[in-house]
Image: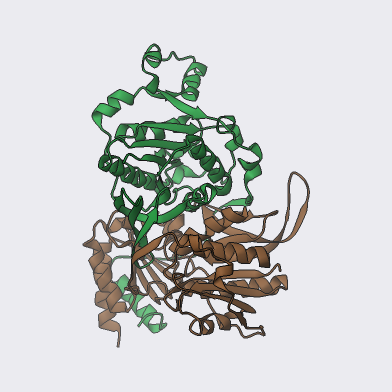
Amino acid sequence: MSLKIVVLAKQVPDTRNVGKDAMKADGTINRAALPAIFNPEDLNALEQALRLKDAFPGSTVTMLTMGPGRAAEIIRQGLYRGADDGVLLTDRAFAGADTLATSYAIATAIKKFGDYDVILGGRQAIDGDTAQVGPQVAQKLGLTQVTYAEEILSLDEKTRRITIRRHIDGGIEVVEAPLPVVITVNGSAAPCRPCNTKLVMKYKRAMGGLEKAELAKQGKELPYAALYEERPYLNLKEWTVADIDGDVQQCGMSGSPTKVKTVQNIVFQAKESKTLTAADCDVEELVKELLDKKIIG
Amino acid sequence: MNNVFVYCEIEGTTVAEVSQELLTKGRKLANQLNVELHAVVAGTDIRGKVEDQILPYGVDKLFVFDAPELFPYTSAPHTDILVNLFKEELPQIALMGATVIGRDLGPRVSSSLTSGLTADCTQLEIGDHTDVKTGTVYKDLLYQIRPAFGGNIVATIVNPDHRPQMATVRSGVMQKAIYEGECRKEVVYPEVSKYVGHEAFIVKVLDHHVEAAKHNLKGAKIVVAGGYGMGSKEGFDQLFELAKVLHGEVGASRAAVDAGFCDHDRQIGQTGVTVHPKVYIACGISGQIQHIAGMQDSDIIISVNNDPDAPINRIADYVINGTVEEVVPKLIKYYKQNSK
């Protein structure tokens, strides 16, 4: 049995390591100060996809991402690890999408693939932490969903049912679901394999049209321009709303039922604090004070 | 119609605490909007066992769906129950816990109904909204307030045109309280097959194993929390000792959990547990906003840090300038000497 596997992955700002320069004085986010990374749990999902491909030779793994031209990096990172191809959904009409409009675009693109058995994605992205897109894609495709997956345990070729271990609140669960299925993978799952050197050599010049256009805009020449005709796989696919026969009204801001009313920078009320040293007398005095006030003890 | 709904999550026949917290919040919202609070629960052999855990929080009407295979939870049957019930009842607000179940169910329901859903809200309020472009004024919307961008900003989200307005809230963010006012406390037991088709039971749960929480971090009166500055898993041992002496619990920042110093279920912050202790002792925690969001309501905050500029010091009542290795043993020693 060969499987058609789709991996949903997102390029995100690295919100885990926000330094002091991440917020501008006016309270907006200084995106330039945050490096763009492969959403961590999407890497866990990619690993599960590659394991399925290893177990069922002839299977293919297709990366699917949405974002600006530079998000093509996500597809390259997938190719470096063993994915077969990828598509970048990119269109101004997708901008400002909440999770529902995002899942509409992704589900519509997956329908365009026609054939699919397993759709894998990270449980959530670190820039929004919502965990909503996976289940919403599943609903829009009318597919079964298994969220918070930790490991795909087995796949029965005859019954086409997949067995998955999930990480649930306070424990674990093992479930069995029919294909096709949408699976979202938890950060506690196996980490993703590193890039394969041969694949890096093969795909390092892979580029999307928008990236090439950006180079041209900067007046830079495309290195090895002839290579892209010779090796068509170096031209990464970019799809617009029109390419997926999407309804613009259901994309981006207009397809989003939730609206951001206000955004505020968080300012915590500073307190008047008492500063102590680590000296014995200071520490003892503090402990006595807390005991006297019956705050501890 | 137009009522506030809370989906109550269960483990066996025990209603989750987060659902009770949401009932209390839902009651307040319903009072403000002058509508009823309705609750829905689905499980197996729960009739007569769950009502008393739900009604006292101010519920006017409870829908109990009791049928085989509704427990353990699977996505499709519970989605069908909510979607079909909401189509009949047309609630204006629907709340559920930001748990594994709530975060599996909420998006599936919202996508089915094309309604907006906001995850992990930290505050829910009622207010008006004016659309900047059209000038349309919307009365009494649910303000869904949540941290975003790793907790560096807080966003207020509204759903002007779609119902229900859906939100999930993490355990411990709201406080539960038995409702003292008047409410109807009606209970109905709808016929499950009218809501859920046979084909919905497509996922089989082969094994379901849940252990009671090993600790009560959420309800602890004293929390000793460690950050990345603890340096190692062994570094946390002294925090466990201090917590034991003080009869408290150990928590950790996301950085410490990510580094493997401490178990994930002890993470305090926006994506972890929210705590409200009497005393919070932050050891080697710099105080990223997403951490502070989970502990800022502590009565007294003590920061032990050798960086005098650590952001957490700004919200601390006491700052001890020193290394954790030096200060924590002294706290233990002087507590033992001076207590009793």
Left or right: residue A21 versus residue A78 is right
Location of residue B288 with respect to B297 vertically, above or below: above
Residue drawn at (44%, 54%), measured in percent from left and top?
A: A145
Residue drawn at (32%, 71%), measured in percent from left and top?
A: A282
Position of the N terminus of chain A by quadrant: top left
Left or right: residue B199 versus residue A158 is right
Residue drawn at (37%, 14%), measured in percent from left and top?
A: A230
Residue B158: image quadrant is bottom right
What chain is the green one? Answer: A
Residue B266: image quadrant is bottom left
Q: Position of residue A9 (x, y in %)?
A: 42, 41
Q: Position of residue B99 (x, y in %)?
A: 45, 64
What chain is the brown one? Answer: B
Left or right: residue B336 versus residue B285 is left
Q: Position of residue A50 (x, y in %)?
A: 30, 41
Along the line of sight, the residue nearer the viewer: A60 or B4: A60
Along the line of sight, the residue nearer the viewer: A201 or B215: A201
Location of residue B287 with respect to A137 vertically, above or below: below
Left or right: residue B119 versus residue B11 is right
